[in-house]
Amino acid sequence: MAYLLVVIFGYLLGSIPFGFLMGKWKGIDLRTAGSGNIGATNALRILGKPAGSAVLALDALKGAVACWGAPALSATFLSGGDASLMPVIAGFAAVLGHNYTCWLRFKGGKGIATSAGVLLALTPGGLAISLSTFLVLLAVTRTVSIGSIAAAAVLPFATWICGGRGPLLVITAIMGILAIFKHRANIQRLMAGTEPRIGAAKGGDK
């Protein structure tokens, strides 16, 4: 029961569609604007830097809070078992909630910002390596999706380098694969040479 509660907690927290809500507050439905994604990058492009930055921060925060809140929740309900698994389970559930939010017919973002929040809570060193990869590729290519895909690809290796083992390593590997899968449309545009770079009005998103 405790594990199920942690999954529900993480999923519902992650499912809060901050990009969609911010857009609605500004009178814009992000699902029909720009790339049609409710994540941080599309929010930045369509809603502007202040609102987009707020979406980025909130999407990351819900991933971190899911991990930080799981131990207290498990301590209340867990009778036997490994409580150390709770933050990992809650974090992964939060990413799934963001990517497949129940409030928008299970269509959400790509999980990059929420995954970053989870990494901040579980493996800050792994986050630093993945974030550095993202920033370097972004600077070189000026393409957000390339940086995001590269960061997702190195995530399990970054986790391993920073001492992550067992369930944490498995979950970060799955998170990386899921993030790349969610970027499949971006990959198609990259192959076709139509993926926009920084400054474009439309294109890939987090």
Image (cartoon, rainbow, N blue to C red):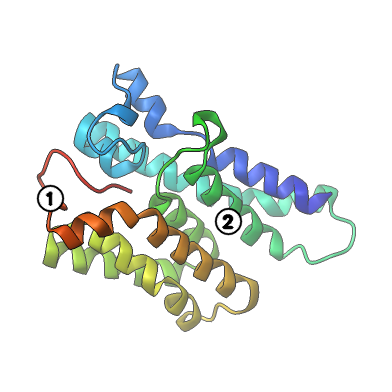
Q: CA distance from mark 1 to mark 2?
A: 29 Å
| Camera-nearest residue between 86 and 109 | 109
In percent of width and height, residue 186 lies at: 26, 54
The residue type indicated by label 1 comes to Ile
Q: Residue at x 20, y 69 (%)?
A: 136
Q: Report helix, strand or loop for mark 2.
A: helix
Q: Is residue 142 left or right of residue 117?
A: left
| Residue 20, disc | none
Residue 114 seen by the camera: yes
| 60 up-or-down from 175: above or below | above
Q: Residue at x 29, y 27 (%)?
A: 32
In percent of width and height, residue 65 lies at: 56, 47
The residue type indicated by label 2 comes to Phe
Image-quadrant location for residue 177: bottom left
Q: Which residue was labeled with disc 1?
A: 198
Q: Report helix, strand or loop for mark 1.
A: loop
| 145 up-or-down from 45: above or below | below
Q: Which residue was labeled with disc 2?
A: 92
Q: Is residue 166 left or right of residue 183?
A: right
Residue found farthest to the right? 79
In percent of width and height, residue 5 lies at: 75, 45
In percent of width and height, residue 15 lies at: 54, 38
Q: Residue at x 46, y 56 (%)?
A: 115
Mark 1 in CB contact with mark 2 (< 8 angstroms): no
The earlier-in-sequence mark between 1 and 2 is 2
Q: Residues within 10 Å of mark 1 (few under 14, many from 20)?
A: some
Residue 48 seen by the camera: no
| Camera-nearest residue between 140 and 203 | 203
Q: Residue at x 9, y 45 (%)?
A: 199
Q: Residues within 10 Å of mark 2 (few under 14, many from 20)?
A: many
| Camera-nearest residue between 52 and 199 | 199
